[in-house]
Image (cartoon, grey):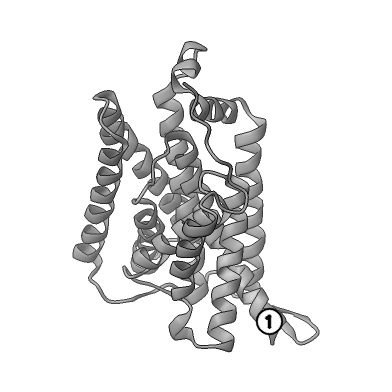
Amino acid sequence: MLFQQLVNGLTIGTTYALVAVGFSMVYSVLELANFANGAFYVFAPYIVVLLYVSMGWGFIPAFLIAVIATGVLGAFMDRFILTNIRGRKAPISSSMVATLGVSTVIMNGLIAIFGSDTKAVPNAFPVGKVYIGSVIITGNQLIIIVLSVVIMAVLSIIVYRTKRGSAMRAIAQNTVAAQMMGVHVNRVITVTFFIGSVSAAIAGTMVAMYYGSVDTTLYTTVSVKTFASAILGGIGSIPGAMLGGVIIGMLETIVAGYVSSAYKDMISFVIIIIFLIFRPTGLLGHKKINKV
């Protein structure tokens, strides 16, 4: 029973980790909490529902279009809204409010177009099951875990092993110095938003297929879980976001299995409170040193 719950928790936890990685990438570059991340997570499955279910397209093209469209939406948010706010030297809180405004527009737009009722998302890959003793791993779980791990590995390589990743880390350390070294700051930030939005879109679509449905209430749930994962792992730390997401997923699954499903969402708030009090830097985070 315990190992089965751990497998279930790992499945959901890897999706939380994937969303938290995108959130942490943006935060590490700008120190900005992107509140639109949860809206992008929900936006992509609705596009899949429109193209795959309503219009009869194949799942793969519907999935790719949904993911790319979500990434472009995230990039547009930065290019046409946040870049202008940064250009006016506004406080970071202004950008946070802007992302919250964008998320509100997206969510209300989805409700206006699709309605507030739950939409079915058929399983596009009805594969079999793997039995390891008494533990059952479904094909969907295996796909989610493997795909999430692969994507997180690719994102880690991008951040830590590529020129674009070096530019991201340079901006995170000192924006002015990075600009003086020839880094196109706004372009790199826009690409970061694109990557973060794509991560959220992939995770949202996989979870919708896993549960077989999607509705707008997922926005609040995933926003809290993403924030909790980032704080637990160390906000701004990409490895920390991965670790935090997996731990959150496993903890809430164990709580649901051994206590009550009514309390599984509460665990995120408890973790946020505990870590903000006793270890605000998280498991893998570091204190920021301000030089004068």
Location of residue 233 in the rendering, given as x and y in whole percent from the top left corner: 58, 54
| Residue 177, x across and y down, in percent | 49, 16
15 versus 101 height, above or below: below
Q: Residue placed at 49% from the left, 23% from the top?
A: 174
Question: Can you say which quadrant of the picture contains the N terminus?
Answer: bottom right
Q: Which residue shows up at 24% across the image and 72% down it? A: 116
Asked whether 144 or 56 is in front, the reply is 144
Q: Is residue 117 above or below residue 220?
A: below
- The answer to whether any part of residue 138 appears in the image is no
Residue at 52% across, 27% down: 173
Relative side of 216 to 101, left or right: right
Tell me which corner region of the image, top left, top right, bottom left or bottom right, holds residue 44. Answer: bottom left
Q: Which residue is mark 1?
A: 4
The kind of residue on which mark 1 rests is Gln
Q: Residue at x 46, y 48 (%)?
A: 23
x and y, in percent, of residue 169 in the image: 55, 30
Note whether 180 is above or below 78 in the view shown: above
